Structures are given as C-alpha cells and as structure tokens.
Image (spheres, rainbow, N blue to C red):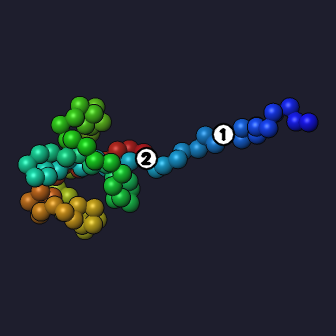
Amino acid sequence: MSQTYGMESPRKHNHGSLRQPSRYLVLIDSGGYMVARLFLETREQVAEFDGAAEEVATMTIGLEPEVGALGPEWDRALQGHSADERAAAMVYTFEI
C-alpha cells in the first residue's frame, strides 16, 4: 500500500517566468481622461488602468517619455485613438 493515502506527491515546481515583461507604458487621452496602457515588446497590450494612479508615477521614476505614438508600429495597438491623441501620447520604454 502507498504511504500517500491516495494523493499524488506534488510535482517539481517550475520557477521560470510565466509571461513576458512589459516593455512600454503609454499614457494617452481617451475620451477626456488619461489612460495608462502596458504593452509587450510586440506592442500587444497586457494591461490598462487609470493614468492618474500613483503606480504610474512609481513606474516612470527616472524615465524620459517619447512624445507621440504616430509610428506604424503603434497603428494596430492604438487603432481606437485619433491622430491628435496619438500625437500627444507619452511613451515610456522600460529596460528589460
């Protein structure tokens, strides 16, 4: 008879990263208020939250934003925004 009382022993835990780190933080106007969006290196959006949240200030300490997200690499990621909103957007790039 097994000494596990019918329960399997836990498998070895995988300590690897489960998701890719965010590479870009974009602060952009959306209908009159600031929205913060996190993107992967591939410009795939992974999070969206209030741009006035204190987390935004914490994440951007020591980073200089690039003003404007008008390049073709942002077309799909920011397709719901006007050209004016995209021109005024602040793009922060995180070091990975």
Work out whether residue 51 or residue 73 is closer to the camera in this orientation and state it.
51
Left or right for 20, reference 84: right
Task: Please name the residue shown 23% across and 45% down the image.
Answer: 36
Q: Is residue 24 left or right of residue 9?
A: left
Quick one: SS at disc 1?
loop
Q: Earlier in the sequence, mark 2 or mark 1?
A: 1
At mark 2, the secondary structure is loop
Q: Is residue 61 visible?
A: no
Residue 90 placement (x, y as % from top left): 19, 49
Three-letter residue code for mark 2: Pro
Q: Nearer the viewer, residue 52 or 42?
A: 52
The residue at the point 16 percent across, 61 percent down is 81
State the residue at coordinates (91%, 36%).
1
Quarter of the view holding residue 9: top right
Q: CA distance from mark 2 to mark 1?
A: 21 Å
Q: Amino acid at mark 1?
A: His
Question: Which mark is on residue 21?
Answer: 2
Residue 53 is labelled as none
* Residue at position x 13%, y 50% in the image: 29
Quadrant into which the C terminus falls: top left
Residue 92, percent from left and from top = 26, 46
Circle 1 sits on which residue? 13
Side (left or right) of 60 relative to 81: right
* 53 relative to 30, above or below: above
